[in-house]
């Protein structure tokens, strides 16, 4: 795996010590290399494409010395409380997004968030920049992740550090095998904007993998971006799908994400700035592991941060097991 363009019109550059955004630098080893061309939208048959590969002995890009392997930070805060998180934020390592990860951090901090997930499309290159930024901004947690983006649905590999193939239909690549690889690395799997069916405006944005067992889903984006302002057109069917999955006996946490691609400058009818919606996670502390543990155990509340949405806090004299309380009576 050396990267995925995701529909970009930019040239893809892969070098020993540098690469274009969303692509992975590293040694150019001898042997057979493969280029896979996506088929997101074919309007005429036969479809044609043109690939030009240029090999150079001198680098095209200057060495990217600021890339560093991700290392999880110590808790930024040790208070047991609800933390305000946005689990669906894009930076320029998503080739359809414009802001830097630092710009996203600055916006999130200015608007009262405690954590954001760098959930870029089918890449982990954003992780190379987290460590230095986490030191520079010690009050906002940066959680690694991947928006696992396919032509039949988008998922969120929350906490993933290892790339997971999204090219369903390639040899050995299925939705089940991909989700299994997400779980194998200790990450959580969520479904993103499951009811966002807008045809060719967003190919594959709605979730159609009905064969994936609900028990393999850890979280579910019940509210996405500015779609609630669009008249609940996408939120209501998302809630219905979530309810149907819960009815099978699966325990799936509710989450929300802005799907921000512009560093807080998303103001269109179907767009939303970072933090809208916000997922409030009750966690032991402000660390990636504790936040994800809170999600895994269903300790979440989703609300729009810039509105008067109610906050729900649960209390019980019976200690919950995960997201479940067993009791003879309730009042």
Image (cartoon, rainbow, N blue to C red):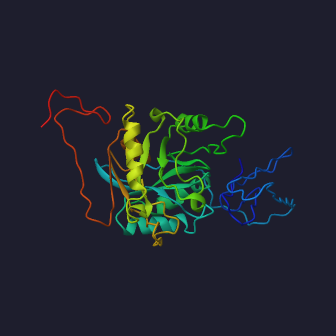
Asked whether the viewer can see residue 171, the reply is yes
Residue drawn at (71%, 52%) of the image: 38
Q: Which of 3 and 47 is in front in this view?
A: 47
Q: Nearer the viewer, residue 266 or 12?
A: 266
Quadrant location of residue 309? bottom left
Q: In this view, does 274 lie to the left or right of 80?
A: right
Q: Is residue 52 left or right of residue 18?
A: right
Residue drawn at (28%, 33%) of the image: 324
Q: In this view, does 206 lie to the left or right of 252?
A: right
Q: Is residue 28 left or right of residue 143?
A: right
Residue drawn at (72%, 56%) of the image: 42
Q: Residue 117's spot in the image, x, y percent?
A: 47, 54
Furthest residue in direction left, as rendered: 331
Q: As displayed, is residue 195 above or below residue 307?
A: above
Furthest residue in direction front, as rendered: 44
Number of numbered markers: 0
Q: Residue 129's spot in the image, x, y percent?
A: 57, 58
Q: Residue 331's spot in the image, x, y percent?
A: 12, 37
Q: Which of 228 and 93 is in front in this view?
A: 228
Q: Which of 79 and 46 is in front in this view?
A: 46
Q: Residue 106's spot in the image, x, y percent?
A: 44, 68
Asked whether the viewer can see residue 290, the reply is no
């Amino acid at each position: 795996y050396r990267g995925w363009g995701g529909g970009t019109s930019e040239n893809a550059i892969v070098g020993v010590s540098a690469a274009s955004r969303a692509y992975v630098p590293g040694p150019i080893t001898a042997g057979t290399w493969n280029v896979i061309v996506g088929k997101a939208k074919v309007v005429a048959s036969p479809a044609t494409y043109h690939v030009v590969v240029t090999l150079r002995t001198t680098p095209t890009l200057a060495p990217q010395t600021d890339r560093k392997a991700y290392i999880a930070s110590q808790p930024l805060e040790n208070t047991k409380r609800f933390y305000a998180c946005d689990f669906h934020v894009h930076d320029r390592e998503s080739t359809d997004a414009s802001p830097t990860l630092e710009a996203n951090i600055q916006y999130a901090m200015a608007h009262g968030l405690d954590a954001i997930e760098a959930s870029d499309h089918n890449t982990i290159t954003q992780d190379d920049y987290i460590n230095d930024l986490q030191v520079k901004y010690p009050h906002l947690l940066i959680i690694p992740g991947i928006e696992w983006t396919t032509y039949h649905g988008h998922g969120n590999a929350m906490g993933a550090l290892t790339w997971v193939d999204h090219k369903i239909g390639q040899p050995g690549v299925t939705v089940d095998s991909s989700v299994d690889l997400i779980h194998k690395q200790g990450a959580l799997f969520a479904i993103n904007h499951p009811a966002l069916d807008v045809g060719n405006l967003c190919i594959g944005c709605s979730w159609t993998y009905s064969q994936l067992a609900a028990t393999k889903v850890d979280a579910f984006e019940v509210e996405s971006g500015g779609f609630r302002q669009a008249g609940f057109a996408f939120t209501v069917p998302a809630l219905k799908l979530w309810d149907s999955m819960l009815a099978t006996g699966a325990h799936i946490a509710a989450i929300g994400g802005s799907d921000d691609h512009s560093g807080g400058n998303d103001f269109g009818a179907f767009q939303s700035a970072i933090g809208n919606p916000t997922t409030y996670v009750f966690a032991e502390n402000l660390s990636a592991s504790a936040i994800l543990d809170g999600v895994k155990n269903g300790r979440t509340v989703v609300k729009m941060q810039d509105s008067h949405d109610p906050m729900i806090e649960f209390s019980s004299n019976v200690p919950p097991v995960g997201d479940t309380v067993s009791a003879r009576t309730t009042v």
